[in-house]
């Protein structure tokens, strides 16, 4: 993302366009570009400031130093009269969020058409955002999910601001003023008219995006009162086109979701009215069935159900508790001072006074220790639901059957398998679990609800599962030796969070679709779900820089949950001040950041190699 000392400034604010130093009119800009034509590339810096066009203002915040540097950062601002946005759609909250994402996608499409790049309708190599690739004009737009974004800000007064980048044209290291004039004075106004004018959209299009997002938000808010962890609407389309294309699968063979009658409930939507579907209750839920019948597809939809989805995605009415966290085994990851003793007892070869599982640290975790750490870390950040797929779980962590209990005595096995803790987690801590299991019937004894997927059709088979459990007892013994107690939150050592690199005090950035560079370290987040875009990694990277500067300066302190609270509070303050929540991070005018959850940020911090903890609170 950035290599900049201001990347973690706590009070970074975007300058309002009217407050930016005026540079002139669009006619003055044309003259300026003509004068600059053929001069050295750094002459483009004379463009910084505000340029007033008919119907909008262009603000040039940063000009690239040479043709190969990161592109120039700019903003356009349109007032309420020019935008034509309906006041009812600009209300702060889900409506404005859905509207902003729609505008960002439209801007990306229009920019792509001008520069030959793809828009959000053309998938990237990953399922990331729809940036107009190969285009001189580029904006970061969301994909299928609707999240807080920094690219577009819709204000309650119906004004709208879009933040984008421009690769200013050159001939070698000389300014190409004519090409720049075509780009900024011809192409850009067309893009602005296509994206920032409500009259350019099909009738009802903006309303649909705003109101669908509000309805999805309302569905999610009903879950806890109804004692549900998730809801999947009848008619939802869960399969995706591919592992790298999050758009819905199409064709005659697509099976739309149909709820089992025993779990069908009706929830209310403030705009579209009642909707029926499957409510997954709190407790322990097993999702079973044969291979390739849709178990993991359902779990993937639930995992991404913590975010809203755009109209037409097929998962608009699939919502999950926002504090659901998917956990998995992750061989080779680092772990810093995590109390995994509820799952892993004393390890062989660890003597008295040495590091043990009550404060477990390693640079190379095994499958079982990494999954145990992931669960404890999720609980520390406030998870209420654990999502587990047997395909990515450690077998020896999930289950130890009767035969293995006979072969390897309990006193020689440090692992307390998850099957012996899953019910206790719900009973004692209120943490539910949804598990995809096709090969371990021992969990039937622990399940409150059992679903089976048969050719993508969902059935509830709880009664039949209990009959099977009674008639075919496993004979295994429970291996719990002590109660499961929520570990105390850890206190991070500020000295172990060093975002500097070389002469740069703060160097944080996203590297590809699944890695974050933090100072001299690189974090692999490929196993953290649901990461939905590179822009989300950028947001997390900026938050990590913000935390590091805050801890090292003494502005932040306390245990990890308190630090996560502080990040959320800063973002809430930014939103309350009429900024995007992400303006609390970075420079305050960045347009390439996307929202994230506290759990996602915690997962990144927990994977920082070299992280140390000072103790517990």
Image (tube, rainbow, N blue to C red):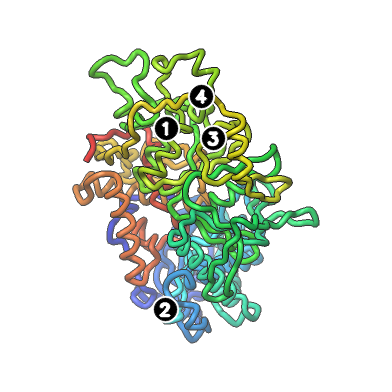
Q: Residue at x 32, y 39 (%)?
A: 486
Of badges 4 and 3, nearer the viewer stands 4
Distance between the alpha carbons at the discs numbered 4 and 1: 21 Å
Rounded to the nearest whole Å, what is the CA distance between mark 2 and mark 1? 46 Å
Q: Position of residue 570 (x, y in %)?
A: 30, 59
As drawn, 444 above or below 246: above
Using the image, determine if residue 576 lies above or below residue 364: below
Q: What's the mark number on residue 443?
A: 3
Which residue lies at the image location 23% right of the left edge and 34% below the top edge?
614
Q: CA distance from mark 3 to mark 2?
A: 51 Å
Mark seen at residue 372: 1
Q: Secondary structure at mark 2?
A: loop
Q: Going by the image, does 482 lie left or right of 134?
A: left
In this image, 201 relative to 416: left or right?
right
Identify residue for label 4: 476
Question: Dot 3: within a 10 Å radius of its alpha carbon, few (fewer than 14), some, or many (20 or more) residues?
Answer: many
Query: Looking at the image, do the residues carrying marks 1 and 3 touch, with CB atoms under 8 Å apart?
Result: no
Q: Earlier in the sequence, mark 4 or mark 2?
A: 2
Q: Is residue 168 visible?
A: no
Q: Residue at x 46, y 80 (%)?
A: 158
Mark 4 vs 1, N-terminal side: 1
Alpha-carbon distance for marks 1 and 3? 18 Å
Instruction: For the residues labelled 4 and 3, say whether their Cβ atoms are less than 8 Å apart.
Output: no
- Mark pair 4, 2: CA separation: 61 Å
**In what element is the residue under mark 3?**
helix
Q: Is residue 586 left or right of residue 271?
A: left
Going from N to C along the chain, the mark reached first, 1 or 3, is: 1
Quarter of the image with the C terminus in it? top left
Residue situated furthest bottom in the rendering: 81
Mark 2 or mark 1: name the one nearer the start of the chain.
2
Q: What residue would you read off at disc 2? A: 156
The residue carrying pointer 2 sits among few (fewer than 14), some (14 to 19) or many (20 or more) residues within 10 Å by Cα, namely some
């Amino acid at each position: 993302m950035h290599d900049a000392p201001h990347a973690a400034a706590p009070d970074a604010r975007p300058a309002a366009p009217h407050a930016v130093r005026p540079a002139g009119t669009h006619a003055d800009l044309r003259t300026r570009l003509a004068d600059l034509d053929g001069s050295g590339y750094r002459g483009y810096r004379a463009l910084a400031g505000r340029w007033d066009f008919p119907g909008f203002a262009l603000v040039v915040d940063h000009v690239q130093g040479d043709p190969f540097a990161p592109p120039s950062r700019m903003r356009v601002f349109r007032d309420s009269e020019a935008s034509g946005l309906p006041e009812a759609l600009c209300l702060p909250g889900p409506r404005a969020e859905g509207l902003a994402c729609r505008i960002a996608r439209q801007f990306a499409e229009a920019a792509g058409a001008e520069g030959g790049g793809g828009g959000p309708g053309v998938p990237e190599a990953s399922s990331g955002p729809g940036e107009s690739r190969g285009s001189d004009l580029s904006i970061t737009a969301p994909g299928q999910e609707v999240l807080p974004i920094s690219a577009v800000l819709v204000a309650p007064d119906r004004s709208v601001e879009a933040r984008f980048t421009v690769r200013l044209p050159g001939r070698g290291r000389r300014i190409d003023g004519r090409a720049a004039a075509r780009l900024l004075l011809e192409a850009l106004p067309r893009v602005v008219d296509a994206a920032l004018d409500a009259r350019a959209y099909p009738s009802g299009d903006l309303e649909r995006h705003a109101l669908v997002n509000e309805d999805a938000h309302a569905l999610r808010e009903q879950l806890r009162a109804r004692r549900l962890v998730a809801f999947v609407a009848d008619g939802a389309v869960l399969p995706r086109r591919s592992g790298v294309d999050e758009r819905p699968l199409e064709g005659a063979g697509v099976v739309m979701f149909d709820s089992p009658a025993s779990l069908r409930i009706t929830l209310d939507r403030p705009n579209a009215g009642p909707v029926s579907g499957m409510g997954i209750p709190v407790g322990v839920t097993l999702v079973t069935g044969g291979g390739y019948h849709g178990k993991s597809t359902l779990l993937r939809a639930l995992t991404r159900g913590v975010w809203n989805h755009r109209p037409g995605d097929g998962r608009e009415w699939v919502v999950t508790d926002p504090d659901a966290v998917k956990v998995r085994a992750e061989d080779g990851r680092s772990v810093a001072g995590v109390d995994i003793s509820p799952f892993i007892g004393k390890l062989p070869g660890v003597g008295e006074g040495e590091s043990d599982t009550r404060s477990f640290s390693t640079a190379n975790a095994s499958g079982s220790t990494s999954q145990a750490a992931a669960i404890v870390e999720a609980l520390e950040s406030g998870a209420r639901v654990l999502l587990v797929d047997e395909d990515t779980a450690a077998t020896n962590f999930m289950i130890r059957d009767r035969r293995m209990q006979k072969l390897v005595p309990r006193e020689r096995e440090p692992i307390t398998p998850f099957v012996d803790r899953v019910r206790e987690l719900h009973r004692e801590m209120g943490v539910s679990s949804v598990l995809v299991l096709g090969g371990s019937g021992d969990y039937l004894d622990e399940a409150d609800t059992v679903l089976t997927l048969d050719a993508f059709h969902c059935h509830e088979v709880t009664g039949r599962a209990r009959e099977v459990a009674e008639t075919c007892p496993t004979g295994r013994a429970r291996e719990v030796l002590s109660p499961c107690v929520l570990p105390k939150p850890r206190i991070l050592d500020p000295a172990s969070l060093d975002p500097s690199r070389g002469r740069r005090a703060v160097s944080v950035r996203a590297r590809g679709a699944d890695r974050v560079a933090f100072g001299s370290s690189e974090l692999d987040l490929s196993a953290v779900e649901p990461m939905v875009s590179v822009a989300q990694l950028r947001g997390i990277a900026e938050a990590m820089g913000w935390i590091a500067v805050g801890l090292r300066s003494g502005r932040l302190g306390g245990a990890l949950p308190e630090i996560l609270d502080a990040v959320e509070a800063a973002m809430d303050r930014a939103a309350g001040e009429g900024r995007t929540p992400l303006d609390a991070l970075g420079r305050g005018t960045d347009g390439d950041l996307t929202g994230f959850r506290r759990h996602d940020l915690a997962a990144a911090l927990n994977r920082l190699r070299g992280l140390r903890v000072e103790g517990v609170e």
